[in-house]
Amino acid sequence: MQTGQFALRLSDPTISINMQQPIWNFEQEPANEPLDETGVNLRAYFDRMDDEKMRRYDLSWSDEQVVEWDGNFRDDGNLMMFCCERDVEVDEYRQVLE
């Protein structure tokens, strides 16, 4: 998977953050239904996920293995994301990812 790289400039010249933009774009992929804020944010979440981590994903994993692989699910079984209108459970997560 290829990525484009860019640097973020901050007001403090001693701080710099290098980010890589993936070639894939989950946010622009067609959806089966209109996307709400949570749906868009979930797709953006995948767009920012590390390429190496994405390559390790396995369709045959159980939901528990997916939760462990991601590492950002809360104890209540929902994905920890900011700026969401609703919770994202592992079934929706997998539907978008797969």
Image (cartoon, rainbow, N blue to C red):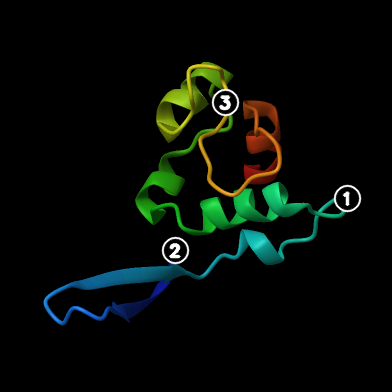
Query: Residue 9, relative to residue 96: is it above or below?
Result: below
Residue drawn at (71%, 53%) of the image: 37
Residue found at the very far left of the displayed protein: 14
Sort mark 2 into few (<14), some (14-19) or many (20+) by Cα contacts within 10 Å.
few
Tag nearer the camera, 1 or 3:
1
The residue that mark 1 highlights is 33
Which disc, if any, is residue 60? 3
- What secondary structure is marked by label 1? loop
Image-quadrant location for residue 87: top right
Count the numbered circles shown.
3
Instruction: Where is residue 44? Give x, y as percent.
Output: 57, 57
Going by the numbered disc 1, the residue's amino acid type is Glu
The residue that mark 2 highlights is 1
Residue drawn at (15%, 82%) of the image: 13
Which mark sits nearer the N-terminus, 1 or 3? 1
Is residue 53 found left or right of 24 in the rendered image? left
Residue nearest the observer in this picture, 97 or 9: 9
Instruction: Where is residue 61? Give x, y as percent.
Output: 53, 23
Image-quadrant location for residue 51: bottom left
Residue drawn at (34%, 80%) of the image: 6
Disc 1 from disc 3: Cα separation: 25 Å
